[in-house]
Image: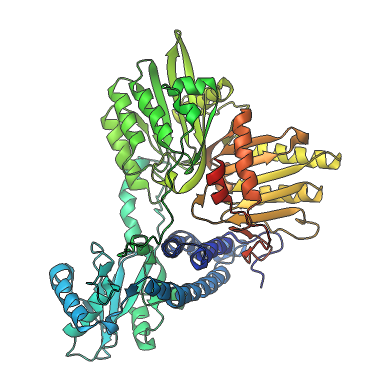
Amino acid sequence: MALISKKYYNRDLSWLRFNHRVLQEAADESNPLYERIKFLAIFSSNLDEFFKVRVSDIRKIKNLDKTLRKKLITKPNKLLKKIKKQVDLQQKEFGDLFKNHILPELKNEGIQLVRCEDFTASQKAFAEKYYKENLQNKLTLGINVERENKKIFIENEELYLTALLNNEEIIVVKIPSDTPRFITFPDENNTHYITFVDDILKHNLAKFYAQKETSVFHSIKISRDAELYIDNEYSGDLLTKIKDSLGNRDTGQVTRLLIDDTMPPELLEHLKKILDANETDILRGGRYHNFKDFFGFPNPTNKKLSEDELTPTRDPQLQKHSSMFDAITEKDRLFYYPYESFDDVLRLARQASEDKNVTKIKVTLYRIAKQSGLADALQNAAKNGKEVFVFIETKARFDEENNIRWGKILEENGATVVYSYPGIKVHSKILLIERTEADNPKTYGYISTGNFNEKTAKIYTDFGLMTANTKITSELNQVFQLLERKIIIPKTKKLLVSPFTTRGTFKTLIEKEIENAKAGQEASIILKLNSLQDDKMIDLLYEANNAGVNIRLIVRGICCLVPGIEGQSEHIYITSIVDRFLEHGRVYIFANGGNEKMYIGSADWMTRNLDHRIEVITPILDKDVYSKIRKMIQLQLDDTVKARIINEDQDNDYINSNSKLRSQLETLSNI
């Protein structure tokens, strides 16, 4: 069953196909058991965000004027039905995987998840003691709602238990969010017993309401619209508006009511009335919700049930230099996280903060760690009299509060901090350091595909380039002048900067491949992206296909291009890699008549990245850096283990090959 037009696959349905690839990793028995459990948590967390963001956007279309709505290609009701159908199928697959595969395998390892109905006498006593000591005082014991009453409020993404009492009252109990989700019982018979805090509550609530005729308690969870909807973003203090709007996420419109699929119909009907929900809001899940809590699932055994922790390497040639500035002057330096350590970025920042010859440090921060060595170095630099400029993007969804917090700290320590621009996000990941050498200023630059974030640098694959090449650093300085509002448009010949030159340059590069193909010359395009959505870029790739350009794409997430269609995309082959580390780097390679051109940067081929964000993409000019990236990309092109084929229906079939090459594993031994 095709979910697409023959020209473009819907972006939201494509995203759901990506999340299905995550679910496939949870089903993959070659992964260690706790890695599979982790993928269940990632799947659940991803789906929560999808409903808070994308589904809310689609529902907003329904509120448009009917005349305007008719002109849109997207039909919101039709799309929501397709989304619901896909999610229902995935939820069933998820439930079957957890119940019939994960739980038995845990049991084989001596770990048993116990439901309240199966508590032994000693476990019941433990549950009652735990309830009195840790839960009872945290509960507002139930919101009693007669079925005729109108509405109650359920908090966003919080867990609740609900039951129907005497067929006339609904009881709703919030599970305390500051309590561990998993409770470990004392071991019995050489078995480790674990239960959900949900079951501890269910057992005790059943006792509390024993005098009333009650149905079994069932889990419910609501997702709400997470958009901030800042009115008139172009006037007033945008930072203050963002701060004031953060609380709206807790009260936004319902986008999903997730229920236990064993919930009796009469209870569900009452819930729909008091929660102002309709059938399209309802998604049926299993007994438990918030599987993202499985990120913290305990391992009470001494068995190795997860992957070995990765120890990132450090370039021995780089470590020979006591000064990062000397090392970068010698040649461009490339880092490939998480295989290589992020510590050398922190080392550069620390040296810059203490070096008496450094005069300026400029950086953009999109998603920064809560505990950040980079931010510490920036504070130290400002205290040491350096001119420190920090652009903080406060519209980085779900990181707004942390970004604002760091902005305040940096300001208090003497840095100049500039916050979001109205109408445009700054998504680039760039750093510039100015240093006085031989009485002249010299600049050092860093351009990355990923954030300045020590935590995500351990689990996201990203490239980071350090360079003193003036062809790059002089143009990088112009980008910062733009952010400092000293210029309106940066003039760049080497760097691609959205929204100014990125789209146009990529268009020119593709047209060159088309021209070469028609002339019988070598013509190919290799792209590694997180997402491919922009219809104009897709149309250019279709045009290149029809000219005979060989096109090879690696797209992790959303892919709206439809491959394999005669006369449109038969020369386009796409794979998607989902593995232990999140593929996050963007690489763009063009044959260029045999003199290959390569770029890396922060921009996907989505309309927002090309036209509505400030992105920075750099050419790779150093031959050693080029060779290193090319080798890593070739491993991914050759992946036959974790790569899925993206066909016209996005079925997520694995590659059928006798040769078995897992690119992330090969990278570990080739870095």
Residue at 37% from the left image edge and 77% from the top image edge: 287
In the rendering, at what x and y percent does residue 75 appear?
59, 67
Is 356 placed above or below 368 here? above
Is 167 placed above or below 249 here? below
Q: Quadrant of the N terminus?
A: bottom right
Q: How is the image coloured?
A: rainbow
Is 476 placed above or below 14 here? above
Q: Is residue 396 visible?
A: yes
Residue at 63% from the left image edge and 26% from the top image edge: 493
Does residue 140 appear left or right of residue 411 in this picture?
Answer: left
How many numbered markers are drawn?
0
In the rendering, at what x and y percent does residue 579 appear?
52, 56
Q: Quadrant of residue 173?
A: bottom left
Q: Quadrant of residue 380?
A: top left
Residue at 48% from the left image edge and 30% from the top image edge: 316
Q: Quadrant of the C terminus?
A: top right
Q: Quadrant of residue 256?
A: bottom left
In the rendering, at what x and y percent does residue 622 appear?
61, 28
Q: Is residue 619 visible?
A: no
Is 195 placed above or below 231 here? below
Q: Residue furthest right?
A: 519
Pick whichever, 262 or 10, lies toward us.
262
In the rendering, at what x and y percent does residue 49 appear?
43, 60
Pick whichever, 662 or 170, lies toward us.
662
